[in-house]
Amino acid sequence: MDENKNEMNPVVADFCTLLESRNVSYERNQQDVNMIRFRTKLPNHDAAPFILIHFNPQNSALSLALSRLALFSSVSEDLYKLMNEFNSDPANFACKMFTDKDGQIIVLTNAILKGENTNAQIEEYINISVLAVDKYFGKISELIDSSNNN
């Protein structure tokens, strides 16, 4: 076991062990031992966003973000419409799409982890987030193509 995992909350350390068992490389945040990131692939698109995971042991809160999905130099009305559509889609349970100050699209999911099998809970939230992004990635790509043509 990695010596730095001793400083991590057991929930994060266990998930890191799961990633290692699947040969998924990850990075630890230097300022917060309970935050990691790794890459994933969308099932139906050629995109590999980062997944950032943070666990707050004080309240058992999981924050999960998919980032590096797309970069927009300006936010258009069509992008706001797409974000509203994504955010109101009940299939995207607990996922919210927004843009950061640099124009990066981010999908954020927050949850409280309870019970014994936190790895399964984290994986379920990852799956929900990845499938939600995958469902809308074609529309995101269309917006990018449209903005590049204009």
Image (cartoon, rainbow, N blue to C red):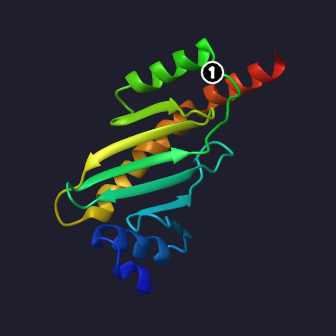
Residue at (59% x, 20% y) in the render? 79
Residue at (41% x, 72% y) in the render? 18
User: Dividing the image into 4 quarters, which one contains the C terminus?
Assistant: top right
Compared to residue 115, the image places residue 3 above or below, namely below
User: Dividing the image into 4 quarters, which one contains the N terminus?
Assistant: bottom left
Is residue 129 rendered to the left or right of residue 105? Answer: left
Amino acid type, label 1: Val
Position in image of residue 44 (x %, y %): 61, 43
* Crowdedness near tag 1: few (<14), some (14–19) or many (≥20) residues, C-alpha within 10 Å: few
Q: 11 or 73: which is nearer to us?
A: 73
Q: Quadrant of residue 7?
A: bottom left
Spot the residue most to the top. 77
Position in image of residue 100 (x %, y %): 55, 34
Compared to residue 107, the image places residue 20 above or below, namely below
Spot the residue most to the right. 149
Compared to residue 61, the image places residue 105 above or below, namely above
Is residue 122 rendered to the left or right of residue 85? Answer: left
Q: 63 or 119: which is nearer to us?
A: 63
Q: State the residue position of label 1.
A: 75
Position in image of residue 9 (x %, y %): 30, 70
Spot the residue most to the left. 115
Label 1's element? loop
Residue at (42% x, 80% y) in the render? 4
Is residue 78 rendered to the left or right of residue 88? Answer: right
Residue at (20% x, 54% y) in the render? 59
Compared to residue 22, the image places residue 6 above or below, namely below
Position in image of residue 134 (x %, y %): 55, 39
